[in-house]
Image (spheres, rainbow, N blue to C red):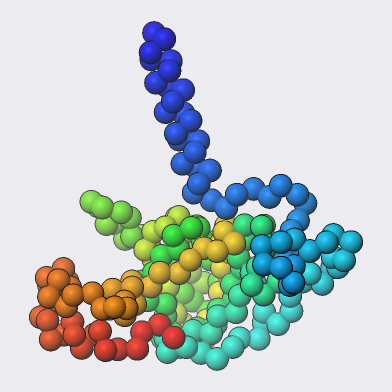
Amino acid sequence: MASNAILFITLALINSICISLAFDPLPLQDFCVTNPLGIGKCKDPRFVTANDFFMSGLDRPGPFNSYGVAPVFASATTTPGFNTMGQTFLRSEFAPNGFLPPHTHPRASEVIYVVEGSMEVGFVTSYPDYKYYSKVLNKGDVTIIPFGLVHTVRNVAGGKSVITASFNSQNPGFIFVPDSVFAAKPAINSTYLAGAFKLDEKTVKDLQTKMWYM
């Protein structure tokens, strides 16, 4: 009986550690506004202002990338007050037929809200099922992408579409599947990739010369 109790407690502790490592650490103070004079240090609270927690211009997209997407981020990089809060916010405009390649966020789940237009959003479950859950979202609709799963996002409206996305991490990470495989530096062995993707090696070598997400 005692051994069973010890085993249960040990498993519970391991589970607790795994959960705590899966998300950003909880802050130890009300806030830690990034100090522009010292990386990793907090700004003296006496000199913190409301502007440290504020960002404007999220409604003005930057240039569209090669996939027809114009993202704007509110994050610890753009707004000092986001530091240690475990949050990143994104607004993206999609040109007609614009899309994001299959990608994953290794450190966050993602909530997507459609502001304008129509978007098809889906995610793929892990091995061995690889089940694809997808849904066309219209203005006012919201969905969630589970932590770390590969997902797809594309504009299916006749015109532009606009979404916002919220991540529960200060640094969710963006791993675009085509880029990580075919744009790796140094290049992954083309014979290996040809076998893995069931392609001829000439096609793989051609893909490795492409300019991917930018």
Is residue 66 visible from the viewing direction of this image?
yes
Horizontal and vertical percent position of residue 129: 25, 52
Q: In which quarter of the image is residue 140?
A: bottom right
Horizontal and vertical percent position of residue 79: 70, 71
Above or below for 188 versus 160: above
Q: Which of 171 and 73 is in front in this view?
A: 171
Q: Nearer the viewer, residue 156 or 129?
A: 129
Q: Which of 137 and 20 is in front in this view?
A: 20
Q: In which quarter of the image is residue 146?
A: bottom left
Horizontal and vertical percent position of residue 201: 12, 81
Q: In the picture provided, is 105 more to the left or to the right than 130? A: right
* Number of numbered tags placed on the structure image: 0
Which part of the image, by quadrant, shows the C terminus?
bottom left
Q: Nearer the viewer, residue 51 or 68?
A: 51
Above or below for 150 versus 187: above
Above or below for 205 versus 153: below
Above or below for 3 versus 183: above
Which part of the image, by quadrant, shows the N terminus?
top left
- Outermost residue, front side: 38
Q: Residue at x 49, y 84 (%)?
A: 69
Horizontal and vertical percent position of residue 198: 12, 72
Q: Residue at x 55, y 91 (%)?
A: 63
Q: Residue at x 23, y 74 (%)?
A: 188
- Outermost residue, right side: 46
Q: Which residue is drawn at 38% across and 15% down?
A: 4
Is residue 152 visible from the viewing direction of this image?
no
